[in-house]
Image (cartoon, coloured by chain):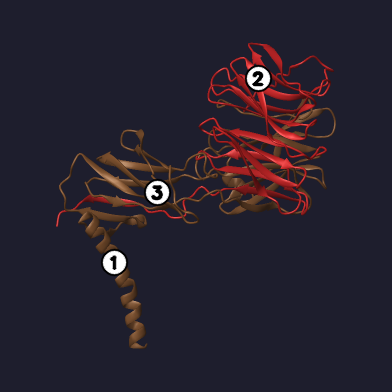
Chain colours: A red, B brown
Amino acid sequence: MSGTWELGYVEPPLSRVGSWSSLALERTHPYTPHISYYDSANGDLKHAWLSGTTWITETVDSTGDVGWYTSLALNSSGIPRISYFDNTNYGLKFAWLSDTIWLSETVDKTGGQPWGRGSTSLELDQGGFPYISYYDAINDDLKLARFDGKVWITQTVDSEGDVGQGSSLALDQSGCPHISYYDATHEDLRHAYIPRRPLVYLPLVVRNHSP
Amino acid sequence: MNKRVLWALIAGPGLAVTSLLLVFFVLGRSTVEATPGGAVAIPDLQPQTATFTVSGTVTCQATGPLSDVEVYAWNRDNGTGFVGDVTDSSGAYRVTLEVGTYRLEFTPPPAAELNARAFTTTQLVTNTNLNVDFCICRGIWVTETVDSAGNMGGSTSLALEPIYPYTPHISYHDIISDSVKYARLTGSTWHSESVDSGGWPTSLALVPTYPHTPCIASRPLGLESRICLPNWRNLDNFTSGGSTGWTRQHFVGIGASLSLQTSH
């Protein structure tokens, strides 16, 4: 890894945008970067991508004060999906690009204001279905939401004490989630995962046999 | 030694092995022999045919039979695969395969709880039917403490290596010393070290190719960010405690998010 850094503005200087940014690259050349971020001037969620040498920006969601703690992922076609926090209704939201129109929905109305302690982390599995780790500010729990193609399924991952701030989610190649997060009660770094191995493993070999 | 105890020690395992032999002999008219690596080899007296069947049930230790589990057969010889069957309400499946070496994958439906896949590699060259029963773990979260030395864990970023065992790497914030730390799982042990003094990490990414060197974007105090790269480029050095520090590159900006492409 060598060379020099090229620096550039996505939006004009002093635009008061860019908090809670999240970046992902398309998988093939020219590895187009996409960024989600919060527009603190207007309380909106925004998306930017590089077209040639020009950054294109657009507003994804402007309903209330939205766009906190964004996390962006691209599907296999390079289409962006974004998880974020709705600071007006205190809920976890998910936005996706359908053709040329951004759509969004509330995933979990947690009802709590994390006051800077929140986070969302988005990953897509091999089928393109989203998984989101996030902090439940009412119960102080780490939670995970996933969309199975029909409905959102939420579950509590860890509820022992005040856990789940600053979470980061990744899926392994077999689709098993791993989450890192902060345990504020014990002031520890923690890791949660679902073991991928089967509980019983039976390798078999069958072959011809001459008596 | 008491003769009754001695007989029990000999007869107990012997009876179990005999029962196992009988089961396989009846099902496949076969005998069983051990192979290196603990696999069970089943020589068959039947003539070789072009196709054969693998059948069995998929179960879960906690809930019993698993339905709607997709059984995917990947032919290791020619690199092709297909969905062989989907388990019924009793968890039963049946897959017809041509002669070859296969990896069978059992994948529960998305509507089930979070699941892992079960894998097995099976070499079949006869028409013997075999029962292969698996137990798939279902949505059981395991949590563990990675670092408890002080006040650790704010602003975490996690990345997994792309191949098994999908080793996790985490960058995180040491709140007391206001510094950047890094942890990596080696076997069953987490190793951690300090990366940068002052500031907190904002994003971690791994180089896609081996040795999957971690790169950490961090934000020290002031209007700048940093990219931190370990001076050790072979992770074996890290696990042996041979870290020789991290190299930092500065650039303007606050709160960086990092991603790497293959050529970088």
Q: Nearer the viewer, mark 1 or mark 2?
A: 2
Q: Which numbered dot is residue A21?
A: none
Q: Residues within 10 Å of mark 2 (few under 14, many from 20)?
A: some
Q: Residues within 10 Å of mark 3 (few under 14, many from 20)?
A: some
Residue A2 pos. (x, y %): 64, 26
Query: Disc 2 is attached to a residue of which chain?
Result: A
User: Which numbered dot is residue B91?
Assistant: 3
Q: Chain of mark 1?
A: B
Disc 1 marks which residue? B19
Mark 1 on the same chain as mark 2: no
Residue A169 in picture, x, y percent from top left: 64, 39
Kindly report the distance in space between the C-alpha atoms of the residues bearing marks 2 and 3: 41 Å
Looking at the image, can residue B157 be seen? no
Please tell me whether mark 1 sits on a helix, a strand or a loop: helix
**In this rendering, the label closer to the viewer, 3 or 1:** 3
Which residue in the structure is indicated by mark 2?
A: A102
Q: Residue A39: image x %, image y %? A: 79, 22
Going from N to C along the chain, the mark reached first, 3 or 1, is 1
Same chain for mark 2 and mark 3? The answer is: no
Tell me what residue is drawn at x 39 percent, y 48 percent.
B91
- The CA span between labels 3 and 1 is 24 Å
